[in-house]
């Protein structure tokens, strides 16, 4: 690379900051002029992108934005931390994507491989920027990457091992439509060669179609129930990599769920408070309702947030099927949309803050003297919070401070 090159880092969140640190340390980019372009710093941050030689796009900045496509037409090289990592990584990459379960599956697989004594790292969309772990990766390292549609969107190479967990509509506020969302995700397998492998759930027609684009071995996984799906596909990948059945089972027994994924944060008498802030679409909230319904106790659901142009019929159907959801408390930007989808079959209250929602839910559940407050937003968090983790932290804080 010529030292005179002008580089832009587009988006300066966790991954953008990681890219900056990598570029500063890399001899290949010594002397380059680096500019940070971020909406928080400048509302017109997308203006004039064509003047840069290289643009590192963060996942939060969609590749198909008109400004980015104009820059591409002007000869600007638009890349990303994901593309850079794939070009430099000496180890075997295991990529995991899907709409629901990719974080849990990635973490479960990491625990299994670590228990088997293998050298393994976990990074990507799950929270640790992949460029941060690159110095620790050798040829013998197994690299597990949780990959979002935005990271995969313009990827031109696929991991040696790919896994596609449950697929359904999501991020339709950013992707043009469902087909474009699926096409972006399909990059996890469509560039594989004959020595590679892709795992998918046999009962998921979208995942099956995505996997069919691979030139590698297509391995269908059958899961008898939703509760064990993530473990089953993680175990299948682990067996493919030579792990014993005993090692896989030991990891399952000791595994603890990731934060904000149907996490039990407090029990007050016979009342339980579940934090499912990682639920950002109707299907994940529907799954949470089904899981809590197994207790056959009253449920007060807290939902709502930033809309992603999704259909809330699956959530309404889950509420109707449960028969245990006694009240719904809605917050956020899309509260009216959810209310319209659910209809008058279940009592609904509107809250202006999360604190108010928790208070309302607790007061309702006290009438029943048992049951669960389920915080499963079914929507993104950016209307009221920094991200789903911030939203989850605030819910936990409110519940733990609540006077019983």
Image (spheres, grey):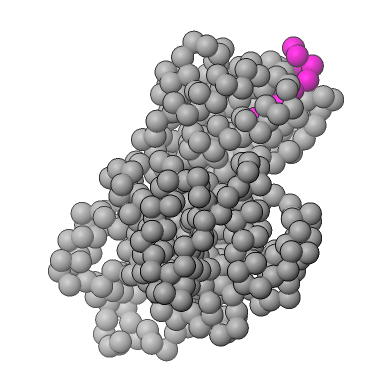
Quarter of the picture holding the C terminus: top right
Where residue 330 appears, as percent x and y from the top left, is 53, 24
Residue 299 picture quarter: top right
Drawn side of residue 338 relative to residue 376, left or right: left
What residue is drawn where x is 22% and y is 71%? 76
Where residue 90 appears, as percent x and y from the top left, is 51, 83
Drawn side of residue 329 relative to residue 18, left or right: right
Where residue 291 appears, as percent x and y from the top left, is 66, 33
Residue 329 picture quarter: top right
List the single residue furthest toward the right: 269
What residue is drawn where x is 75% and y is 14%? 368
Above or below for 25 versus 224? below
Number of marks in picture: 0
Q: Nearer the viewer, residue 49 or 76?
A: 76
- Asked whether the viewer can see residue 290, the reply is yes
What residue is drawn where x is 78% and y is 20%? 370
Above or below for 389 versus 368? below
Quarter of the picture holding the N terminus: bottom left
Q: Nearer the viewer, residue 203 or 150?
A: 203
- Asked whether the viewer can see residue 395, the reply is no
Where residue 281 appears, as percent x and y from the top left, is 48, 38
Q: Which residues are magenta?
A: 366-375
What residue is drawn where x is 79% and y is 54%? 253
Check if residue 374 falls in the magenta segment. yes
Drawn side of residue 212 relative to residue 264, left or right: left
List the single residue furthest toward the left: 74
């Amino acid at each position: 690379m010529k030292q005179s090159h002008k580089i832009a880092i587009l988006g300066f969140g966790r991954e953008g900051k990681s890219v900056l640190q990598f570029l500063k340390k890399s001899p290949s980019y010594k002397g380059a002029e680096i500019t940070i372009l971020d909406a928080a710093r400048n509302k017109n941050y997308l203006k004039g992108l064509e003047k840069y030689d290289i643009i590192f796009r963060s996942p939060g900045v969609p590749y198909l934005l008109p400004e980015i496509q104009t820059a591409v037409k002007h000869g600007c090289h638009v890349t990303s931390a994901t593309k850079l990592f794939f070009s430099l990584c000496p180890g075997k990459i295991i990529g995991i994507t899907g709409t629901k379960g990719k974080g849990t599956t990635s973490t479960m697989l990491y625990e299994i491989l670590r228990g088997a004594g293998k050298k393994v790292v976990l990074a990507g969309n799950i929270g640790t920027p992949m460029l941060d772990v690159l110095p620790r990766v050798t040829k013998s390292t197994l690299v597990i990457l949780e990959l979002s549609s935005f990271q995969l969107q313009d990827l031109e190479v696929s991991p040696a091992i790919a896994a596609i967990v449950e697929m359904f509509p999501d991020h339709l506020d950013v992707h043009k439509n469902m087909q474009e969302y699926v096409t972006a995700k399909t990059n996890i397998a469509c560039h594989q060669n004959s020595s590679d492998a892709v795992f998918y759930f046999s009962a998921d027609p979208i995942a099956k179609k995505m996997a069919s684009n691979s030139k590698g071995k297509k391995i269908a996984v059958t899961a008898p129930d939703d509760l064990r799906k993530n473990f089953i596909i993680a175990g299948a990948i682990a067996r493919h990599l030579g792990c014993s059945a005993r090692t896989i089972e030991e990891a399952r027994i000791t595994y603890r769920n990731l934060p904000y994924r149907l996490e039990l944060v407090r029990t007050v008498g016979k009342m339980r408070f579940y934090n499912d802030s990682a639920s950002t679409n109707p299907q994940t909230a529907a799954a949470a309702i089904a899981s809590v319904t197994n207790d056959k106790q009253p449920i007060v659901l807290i939902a709502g947030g930033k809309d992603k142009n999704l259909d809330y019929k699956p959530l309404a159907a889950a509420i109707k099927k449960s028969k245990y959801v006694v009240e719904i408390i809605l917050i956020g930007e899309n509260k009216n949309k959810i209310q319209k989808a659910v209809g008058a079959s279940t009592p609904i209250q509107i809250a202006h803050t999360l604190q108010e929602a928790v208070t309302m839910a607790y007061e309702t559940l006290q009438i029943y003297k048992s049951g669960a407050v389920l915080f499963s937003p079914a929507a993104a968090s950016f209307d009221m919070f920094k991200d789903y983790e911030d939203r989850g932290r605030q819910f936990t804080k409110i519940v733990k401070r609540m006077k019983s």
